Image (cartoon, grey):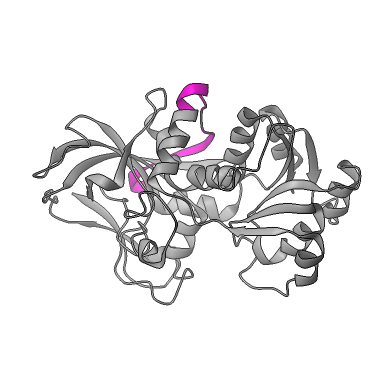
Amino acid sequence: MKVWEVHSKEGLDALTLVEKPEPQPQTGQVLLKMRAASLNYRDLLTVKGAYGYKQKLPFVPLSDGVGEVVAVGEGVTRVKVGDRVAGIFMQTWLEGEFSAEKAKSALGGAIDGILAEYVTLHEDGVVHVPEHLSDEEAATLPCAAVTAWNALTTDGKLKAGDTVLIQGTGGVSVFALQFGKIMGVQIIGTSSSDQKLDKLKQLGASELINYKTTPNWDEKVWELTNQVGVDRIIEVGGAGTFNKSLRAVRYAGHISLIGVLSGFTTDVSTVSILHKGITVQGIYVGSRAMFEAMNRAIALHRLKPIVDRVFPFEEARQALEYMESGAHFGKIAVRF
């Protein structure tokens, strides 16, 4: 079978297509013939060697994919041959609170990912995907969608009529918009592209801000909310946007800290957090229980993920280059 592997920290050129024997499922495992995968910004960082100095080499990248169960090991009861399933991002985070031990089971990072024609996973680490989705659409769910779902539902305080700010038009932000609409919340969207802002409007965003022409977007958010601030911010920018998010969120508001698109570290206005009573919640994807709850909502509302472009399996490197360009809206998929 064909497998994409990263053999060095030399950028995207280190991603190499190799031939390996087809794996066989052991006790409790399932063998998946992969149908589609999708990319996350994290995948770009891992392949380029920028995700962490402890990244093992070689490794198989990508956390998100959907496949057909073609064989099962002894004792498997959760799925059967012929089922279409996706792997959960952290293979041992089934429910409950996050922990350091669960973080060690993240696909495409701590352990090998799914960018291979055949993959073995434990039966506990897979979920059935909504039937109305195509393979490429279903492949977008494990990381970006679960992250957005967790960010909006993690503390149960979000209610219909609230206002949520999303940053940019990547997978997490677009999913947050789609989930927010079915929850009855208002969405304020930001982007540097008027064309992308138009797409956010078509998906139901209430207010739009071009942060290139309006660099003080936090002041604009304050104005749009009658000097109250938004109830929640899906913070994917990181260092370059966090302090503006502190100014844009309301008193006792909530910031879901997710991404590092503009950097890893910055000087934080801790007095703003204290003075405004802001809750800052780090979101690192979510559990299998969250994934399954999200899938029920997706199936009920017939929600369709936004797939910007699909690349063939042999062009996985080009797919990552396209992600690096920032030209995409929503998700980028790979078809096997």
Who's the residue at 64% across and 37% down the image? 177
Who's the residue at 52% across and 55% down the image? 41
Who's the residue at 74% across and 32% down the image? 161
Is 264 in front, or is 276? 276
Is residue 97 something that shows in the picture? Answer: yes
The answer to whether 237 is drawn above or below residue 119 in the figure is: below
Residue 46 pos. (x, y %): 43, 64
Residue range in magenta is 298-314
Give the side of residue 328 with respect to residue 200, left or right: left
Q: Quadrant of residue 203?
A: top right
> For the C terminus, which image quadrant?
top left
Is 320 in front, or is 66? 66
Verify whether residue 306 appears in magenta: yes
Residue 72 pos. (x, y %): 13, 41
Verify whether residue 294 appears in magenta: no
Who's the residue at 91% across and 48% down the image? 227
The answer to whether 303 is drawn above or below residue 122 in the figure is: above
Give the side of residue 82 with respect to residue 226, left or right: left
